[in-house]
Image (cartoon, rainbow, N blue to C red):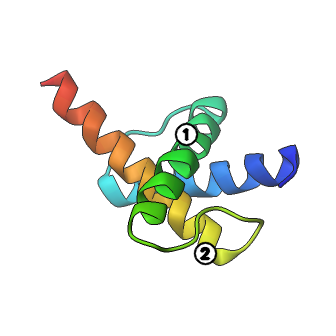
Amino acid sequence: MGLLSWIIVGGLAGMLAQFLLGQGRAGCLMTVLLGVVGAFIGGFVMSLFGFGGVDGLNIWSIVVATIGAIVLLAIARILRR
């Protein structure tokens, strides 16, 4: 997957995760970073359950990255308390 694909998937996943969890809006760079790190986390979690991870610019990759970003935001919420 190319750099542009990672940025697009990361941006979409970051926005979806922030929207679903009701987080405040972050800047563009933080949203993309949230999604990209979420893609790594989501890929790892999905591989543990026997599913495929992030493999291109498609709906499944966005779903996996969003799941990972939600996990990341949930962990951040727990650590802040």
**Residue 33, above or below 63:** above
**Residue 4, above or below 49:** above
**Residue 59, above or below 79:** below
Image disc number at residue 53:
none
**For residue 70, side relative to residue 13 (left or right):** left
**For residue 21, side relative to residue 61 (left or right):** left
Q: Residues within 10 Å of mark 1 (few under 14, many from 20)?
A: some
Using the rendered view, name the quadrant where residue 30 is placed. Answer: top right
Image position, residue 29 (x, y; %): 66, 31
Identity of the amino acid at label 1?
Val
Using the rendered view, name the quadrant where residue 59 is placed. Answer: bottom right
* Residue at disc 2, secondary structure: helix
Q: Residue at x 48, y 63 (%)?
A: 47
Identity of the amino acid at label 2?
Trp
Q: Nearer the viewer, residue 81 or 24?
A: 81
Using the rendered view, name the quadrant where residue 33 is placed. Answer: top right
Residue at image mark 2:
60
Image position, residue 79 (x, y; %): 20, 25
Q: Residue at x 29, y 32 (%)?
A: 76
* Residue at disc 1, secondary structure: helix
Q: Nearer the viewer, residue 66 or 28?
A: 66
Q: Nearer the viewer, residue 24 or 35?
A: 35
**For residue 2, side relative to residue 79 (left or right):** right
Q: Residue 18, can we see it?
A: no
Image position, residue 81 (x, y; %): 12, 25
Q: Residue at x 59, y 64 (%)?
A: 53
Residue at image mark 1:
37
Q: Residues within 10 Å of mark 2 (few under 14, many from 20)?
A: some
Quadrant of the snapshot with the N terminus: bottom right
Instruction: Please report whichever mark, 1 or 2, sits nearer to the chain's N-terminal start.
Output: 1
Q: CA distance from mark 1 to mark 2?
A: 16 Å
